[in-house]
Image (tube, rainbow, N blue to C red):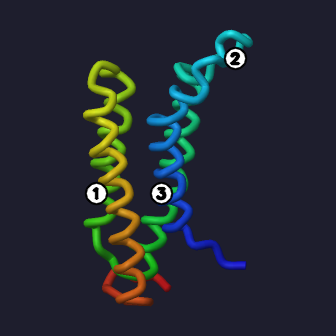
């Protein structure tokens, strides 16, 4: 079975956006039961770490094996800068989350399209 890492990365980014946007609305009663994942720094860090690992692998694979373009990687890293900064500036959470998610999703879409166009491009730095 072949894994489409771009689709997985887009899904992880969307799951993160849904978590950040909708989870507080639906799960605001969890503290009544002693469960607090809404403002749990470990949960937030885990989600960010998971999205970074999946995205970094997907984009590196696309870069190395297919298109050799740094544009998707640059968009992805810019999105993650916004994503990490939003954890420190909570008053600007939504203003930082929106560009973060859009940049990360754009990086995965561009990577996916570039991989399909170039399929298996070779450059001077190609080792396979």
Q: Residue at x 36, y 48 (%)?
A: 101
Q: Position of residue 5 (x, y in %)?
A: 55, 67
Q: Is residue 26 above or below residue 16?
A: above
| Badge 1 element | helix
In the depicted structure, whether residue 110 falls above or below residue 93: below
Residue under numbered circle 3: 55
Indicate which label's residue lies in the foreground, 3 or 2: 2
Q: Residue at x 45, y 43 (%)?
A: 17
- Report x, y in % for residue 99: 27, 45
In the image: residue 58, left or right of residue 67: right
Residue 6: image location, x then y, percent? 49, 67
If you read the primary sequence from the N terminus, does the residue marked by circle 1 or circle 2 appear first?
Answer: 2
Q: What whole-number distance in Å separates the C-alpha atoms at marks 3 and 2?
A: 29 Å
Q: Secondary structure at mark 2?
A: loop
Tag 2 residue? 35
Q: Which circle's residue, 3 or 2, is located before the other in the chain? A: 2
Mark positioned earlier in the residue sequence (1 or 3): 3
Relative placement, left or right, of 111 versus 43 is: left
- Quarter where residue 64 is shown: bottom left
Circle 2 residues within 10 Å: few <14, some 14–19, many ≥20: few
Q: Quadrant of residue 1?
A: bottom right
For the image, the number of numbered tags is 3
Q: Are marks 3 and 2 in contact (CB under 8 Å)?
A: no
Mark 1 neighbour class, 10 Å CA radius: few under 14, some 14 to 19, many 20 or more:
many
Find disc 1 in the rendering and name its residue. Answer: 75
**Mark 1 vs mark 2: in front:** 2
């Amino acid at each position: 079975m072949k894994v489409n890492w771009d689709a997985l990365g887009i899904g992880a980014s969307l799951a993160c956006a849904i978590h950040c946007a909708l989870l507080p609305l639906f799960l605001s009663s969890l503290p009544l039961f002693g469960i607090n994942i809404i403002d749990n720094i470990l949960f937030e860090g885990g989600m960010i770490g998971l999205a970074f690992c999946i995205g970094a692998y997907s984009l590196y694979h696309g870069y190395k094996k297919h298109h050799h373009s740094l544009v998707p990687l640059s968009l992805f890293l810019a999105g993650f800068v916004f994503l990490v900064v939003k954890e420190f500036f909570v008053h600007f959470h939504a203003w930082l989350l929106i560009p973060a998610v859009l940049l990360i999703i754009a990086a995965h879409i561009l990577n996916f399209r570039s991989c399909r166009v170039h399929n298996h491009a070779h450059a001077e730095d190609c080792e396979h």
